[in-house]
Image (tube, coloured by chain):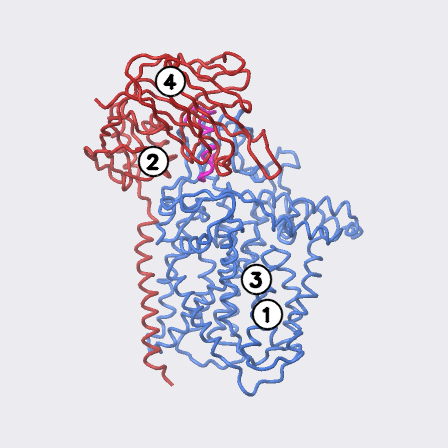
Chain colours: A red, B blue
Amino acid sequence: MPPPASDRRRAAVLLGAVGLVAAVEWLAAAAAYRPAISDADWDAAAAALAALPPDEPVILADDWLGPSARARLPALARAVGLPDLHGAPRLHVLALADWRTRAVEDDLAGLAPRPTGADDLGAFTLHHVALPGAGSVLWDMTVDPSLAARDDRGPCRRSRETWSCRQGRAGIRFAEVAYRPRRCLALELEDGATLELSARAALGARLRGHLGLSDFNGRLRSDAPVLVELAVDGRTRARWLLSDLQGWAAFEVPTSPGPAALTVRVTSLLAGTFTPAGYDPEARRVPCLELRALAEAP
Amino acid sequence: MTRRALVLAAALGLAVTALLARGHQQVGYVRDEGVYFHASRAYADWAARALASPALLLDRPARDRAFAVNHEHPALMKLAGGLSARLFSRPGPEGQPPEARAPAGALPLLPEGAAMRLPAQLLAGLGAALLFLAGFALARPKGHAPEDLSVSPYAPALLAALWFVGLPHVWYHAGLHTFDVPVAVLTLAVVLCYRRALASWRWSLLLGPLLGVAVSVKHNALFIPVLLAVHYLAGLALAGRRPTLGQLVPLPFLSMAALAPLTALALWPWLWSDPLARLGEYIDFHRLHAYYNTEYLGINYNQPPMPWSYPWTLTWATVPSALLLLAAVGLALGLRRDLSDRPPGDLPPASFAAPLRGHPPRDGLLWALFGLFPLALISLPEIPIFGGTKHWLTAYPFLALAAASAWLTLWRAMKPQGRARLLPLALLPALLGPALWSTAHAHPHGLSQYAPLAGGARGAAELGLLRGFWGGQVLPVLDDLSRTPAPLYLHDLHELARQQYEREGRWPAGAPPVPLPRARAGLLFHERHMLSNEVELWNHLGTTAPSAVVTLGDVPLTSLYRASR
């Protein structure tokens, strides 16, 4: 007996739906399973990046492509670990598609970008962006050769980018904070110890900094917070209590332009972590700090 | 079942095994394999000595010494792998100390690691063959004259087999010396045996030992009798008659209750001493398993609650949607049929040995239970999700059968005539093409592959889905390391996996494994939470630029960094 017409219709519709999805998948496979970036694309990007002014940062919009991009495009190294995009009035973003990815938005940190042009480089597009209000960097703690440090028991000994103290050590390096690399001053101190940093700095309209805790496991547990105190010319201007869950936490204070004595005190209340078995002082969480003096936009 | 179908099933199974045995020599050893290789050698050494001197079987210290290694998993696959190496391993390079060199097997055909992978690959071939036969039987049920010849039985047969083994993640896992595809195949074998056992005492007697073998592969199999019980009780309930005493204490379940534990115990010598305490320890290990890190939609998870959507999204993202749609149609049609089917009036009397003889098989319910339960289980917020798709591969053979059933049912409803009868078979390449393309494109990095509609590996990277988790995607950078060797930080490459390369002469000379502070080069396997390790490499080696990057579809999987100073 032949199947009822309604059964045939239903079967035809279902087979048609399966066939349609399969057809779409063939097209999608053709796009997904071919390399999107050729050697020529990389070469074009390398040439375009090499022609950019060296003092203007160029960043990669697509975070996941980072290792390949850093291997092929040396110019990207300049911007690896940037704290954010404040202080960069002009910016260049290399992107496969949309340049305003989540990582870029995070680093814009409230700035309103103004696109000024874009170069088609094959698979990539190089976007040129102005950042009104970003200001410029007058002083950066992570590159100041005169930055001095002391802990509760006395001055620390500096050797290039590291400080050896009686209660621990500190050093300028890369740290993973909130799954992003940041270049900052990493502090490995005893529980409750305070590191005091001091420098003469040319101030602009504001001091802007960040503090984050490395590594990710600590953040997931949210252990003890870190206290940051900022003083200008001996007067305490601000105090922040920052926790794991805040990730790469920004802080900012307005300043009067001109030279000033800066003091930053960082106290890691407990550097270890809490486990179901109790407090474990050996599982270290490392606070990482950066601070810059920014002028207003020209 | 025709002789031709049996021959084709065997040929398909052998072809799958041969392709895996050959192709997976390009697949790097994953972390767990390193441990299993080590355990396999210890188990096989004990087995060989026990064969020569059977008194060793009763020597508890010797037995415990051998089987203490990796006793959180049953021994069967590791024992099989070790014995396979004793048969088929090629000798390692001359000049290395004997303990760091693969010994020659009786028939030295394969590198030692490849030889240890062979039993799992044979089981994958068996899985393809079983699915082919089960798919064939959908069109030509045993004992029934073919009712409808409008659709070739080879269409559902091929579809069922390739739906499963043609998926990139299944193919990847099928070739490894691990347990995930083996336990999926044995789950299928147990379920197919159970179908027969409902009407045959012979199959019932086989069912218990077969379940014991499945349990001896991996703990997933412990859920099988529970799901079978649900199916059986549903079958009784849907029959609409008062069950007999024999139906309430049926032979298939007695067989499972009595013979499966004995078989599992016999196949796991670690349990021969102090079995209850060791069994408790085994169950506790898995019940309280650590939560490793894994990325899902851009978020790193390493503690509960885990997202309930994880297995469903990952299944969509790794299995082509047309195949999933067909499986869903098959489950819906099967369940509808099962809920409406009633046993015929002239049923033979139910017996203890054949409790549901003559009843409808209720395959739809069986596929739904076994096809959905593993995903539902992983959806629970307390269940760790670190293993990606491998933890619910046991579902896929049943989704494959549901899809094959849908293909058959829909085409039969179409009543194709003349040349149109060839369409169900002829259109299979169009249906299976995206999956096979995905698998071929990903090789040897199938663990990192994603389905076309997810955008492949690139689309998954944009979505924030994990790229890998096992430290195995390393072979391409070994060439680079061979040209300029340096003391190497291994990152997520397990030292025992590295030693396996060394035993086979594949590890670059002059690249000893060292801790990061002494490294002049370093590996980095990219995962979201591994950025912590990557920045440590940058700090120590003085560069943020890798010297070599292993990619799939432009997506970096593994980087090799070298010291710049």
Mark 3 Cα-neighbour bin, 10 Å: few <14, some 14–19, many ≥20: many
Amino acid type shown at disc 2? Asp
Q: Residue at x 50, y 40 (%)?
A: B471
Of circles 2 and 4, the one toward us is: 2
- Tag 1 subunit: B
Does the CB distance between marks 3 and 2 fall below 8 Å?
Answer: no
Instruction: Give left or right: position of A205 versus A68.
Output: left
Indicate whether A27 appears above or below B190. above
Q: Nearer the viewer, mark 4 or mark 1?
A: 4
Image quadrant in which you'd find residue A23: bottom left
Camera-nearest label, 2 or 1: 2
Pointer 1 or 3: first along the chain: 3
The dot on residue A106 is 2
Q: Residue at x 55, y 28 (%)?
A: B515
Tell which of A119 and A161 is nearer to you: A161
Mark 4 falls within which chain? A
Q: Are marks 2 and 1 on the same chain?
A: no
Q: Earlier in the sequence, mark 2 or mark 4?
A: 2
The crowding category of the residue bearing disc 4, from other C-alpha atoms within 10 Å (few below 14, some 14 to 19, many at least 20), is few
Where on the picture, by quarter, is residue B104?
A: top right
Q: Position of residue B256 (x, y in %)?
A: 66, 66
Label 1 residue SS: helix
Discs 3 and 2 carry the same chain letter: no
Residue of label 3: B187
* Residue drawn 52% across the image and 26% down it: A269
- Residue tagged 4: A143
- Name the residue carrying label 1: B194
Q: Main secondary structure of the magenta part?
A: helix
| Same chain check for tags 2 and 4 | yes
Q: Give the alpha-carbon distance from disc 4 to disc 3, as whole Å.
A: 62 Å
Range of magenta residues: B524-543
What whole-number distance in Å separates the C-alpha atoms at marks 2 and 1?
A: 56 Å
